[in-house]
Structures are given as C-alpha cells and as structure tokens.
Amino acid sequence: MIRIRHVFPLRRAVIAATVLLLSACSTSSMLVGQARPPIDVSQVRIYHAPPAVPYEQIAVIETASGPVTYGEQNKLNAVLDKLRREAAKFGANGVLLQGTANGYGGTSVGVGTGVGRFGGRSYTSGGVGVSVSPRPKYATGIAIHVPNPPPPMEPDAEQ
C-alpha cells in the first residue's frame, strides 16, 4: 500500500530533476559591442563566412541543444535557432557562426543494493537504473549587425 504522504516527496523530486535537466543546456552571451533594440527572430540570418559588406559585432553567443533532442539534424537546427533568438534580443540581424561541436553523452547502467533494520526486522532492497541521454551539440556564434545585408543567393537559403 502506498501512502499519499510518500507520493508528494517523490513528485517534488521528479519536478526538481526535470527543472535541473531542462536548465542544464542554456544559452549564454557576452556583449562586445553596442546592443540595439530587439528585432524579430525571422530577420536574423546565419552567416558561415563573414559578409562581404561591413558589419558590427554585438555579442558572442554560446548555446547547446536540449537534453532530449535526438537526431543530428534536429540538434543542429536547435542550436542555430537558439543562436538566432539570442541575437534578436540584442538587435543583431545576423549570426556569424564560429563552430559547432558534439558533447558527451550515451548510455550508462547503475546497480544498487541496500540493507536496513527497523523495529527488529531486516530489509534488503536492490535496484537497477539505466540512463540513455543523447549527446548534446554545442555552437558558438557572433551576433552581428549588417547595415544593408545582401539578399540571399536563392530563396530560403542562407550564406
């Protein structure tokens, strides 16, 4: 029989673990220039090489894919989207991608046992835990402002 008072601490522990897991892969930024008013994320382009026109550096951004993002393309899309969102907060209309890298992750198995004595009785317990977590993808970029950005080479394409 499960008593109600034992369920609440477990629920609180699960909620706390979920919050920690989701906040583990956050985005950080460092202002290196003059921030501008925020813009819409859809106006932020990813540049894989410096644009041919003059630009202004605004911030350095580092981010990682979420803890439950599976698939290499999904991870790449997640980090690029996070770079765009963070750049838009600074009013940058571009992100000069500096690079991406894969993090550590994988599968681990843990086994535990316990022995106790309470009220003249002995108790023994055991458990097996399995953790399967995807490897996160990390990305670094420089939020930039390009005064007159050149048009994309083809529709929906990015430089």
Image (spheres, grey):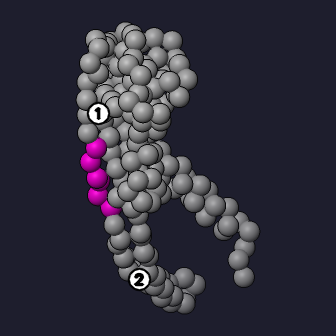
Asked whether 32 or 70 is in front, the reply is 70
- Please identify, in this view, whether the residue under mark 1 or under mark 2 is nearer the observer: 1
Please report whichever mark, 1 or 2, sits nearer to the chain's N-terminal start. 1
> SS at mark 2?
strand
Is 5 displayed left or right of 84 in the figure? right
Q: Name the foreground residue: 128 vs 151.
A: 151
Question: Residue at (72%, 73%) from the top-left corner?
Answer: 3
Q: Is any atom of residue 24 visible in this view?
A: no
Q: Is residue 110 visible?
A: yes
Q: Nearer the viewer, residue 35 or 109?
A: 35
When the figure is inspected, residue 64 is found, relative to residue 46, above or below; the finding is below
Using residue 6 as the reference point, say whether residue 125 is left or right of it: left
Q: Quadrant of residue 139?
A: top left
User: Which residue is at the far front?
Assistant: 154
Residue at image location 37% in from the left, 39% down from the top: 63
Residue 106: % across, % down: 34, 66
Horizontally, is 48 left or right of 76 in the view? left
Image coordinates for residue 69, horizontal then vertical, percent: 46, 56
Q: Which residue is mark 2?
A: 113
Nearer to me, 115 or 10:
10
For the C terminus, give its image quadrant.
top left
Q: Is residue 141 above or below residue 75?
A: above
The magenta stretch is 100-105
Label ID, residue 48: 1
Q: Disc 1 residue type?
A: His
| CA distance separating discs 1 and 2 | 52 Å
Dot 1 surroundings within 10 Å: few (below 14), some, or many (20 or more)?
some
Q: Is residue 142 magenta?
A: no
Number of numbered discs on residues: 2
Quadrant of residue 15 in the image? bottom right
Labelled pair 1, 2 in contact (Cβ < 8 Å): no
SS category of the residue bearing label 1: loop
